Amino acid sequence: MSLLRVILTQNYFTFQQTIYQPNQGIAMGSPISSLIAEIFLQQYEDKNIKHLLDTKNIAYYARYVDDILIIFDTTKISLHTITRYINNIQSNIKLNTTYEQHSSIDFLDLTITRQHKKLEVDI
């Protein structure tokens, strides 16, 4: 924990030949930034998102780095409710929603299309 505290408080980066120290978090590009972000997000999900899956308020949740796919039943919960809940947990994390258009949505390099009671995935 002492070593982690040193890493988090003595965190510097250079941009256009000027040295900066972030007020919070870790500088992008730091060798440890992706690991710290992943640890934080896994804890965040376990504490705040897992119960939405357990209670069946959302049917599916997947995250790849900072891209999140949530599948939910609009008769059980609304997109507004999910967005408001997630955006109020941690002030530095905001969910920017992308809406389904013509029953499909792009996620990473995939196009996911809703077909009656199944999903069709295309690259």
Image (cartoon, rainbow, N blue to C red):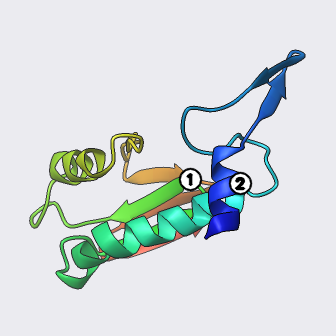
Quadrant location of residue 29?
top right
Q: Position of residue 71 (x, y in %)?
A: 34, 65
How many marks do you count on the picture? 2
Q: Which residue is mark 2?
A: 7
Which mark is drawn over residue 66?
1
**Mark 1 crowdedness (10 Å alpha carbons): few <14, some 14-19, many ≥20:** few
- Side of 98 relative to 17 (left or right): left
Q: Residue at image x 55%, y 55%?
A: 107
Q: Position of residue 18 (x, y in %)?
A: 83, 16
Type of residue at label 1?
Answer: Asp
Q: Nearer the viewer, residue 3 or 112?
A: 3
In the displayed structure, would residue 56 be above or below residue 96? below
- Side of 67 relative to 85 (left or right): right
Q: Residue at image x 24%, y 77%?
A: 51
Residue 109 seen in the figure: no
Which mark is drawn over residue 9?
none
Q: Secondary structure at mark 1?
A: loop
Q: Nearer the viewer, mark 2 or mark 1?
A: 2
Q: Secondary structure at mark 2?
A: helix
Type of residue at label 2?
Answer: Ile
Residue 30 seen in the figure: yes
Q: Position of residue 61 (x, y in %)?
A: 40, 70
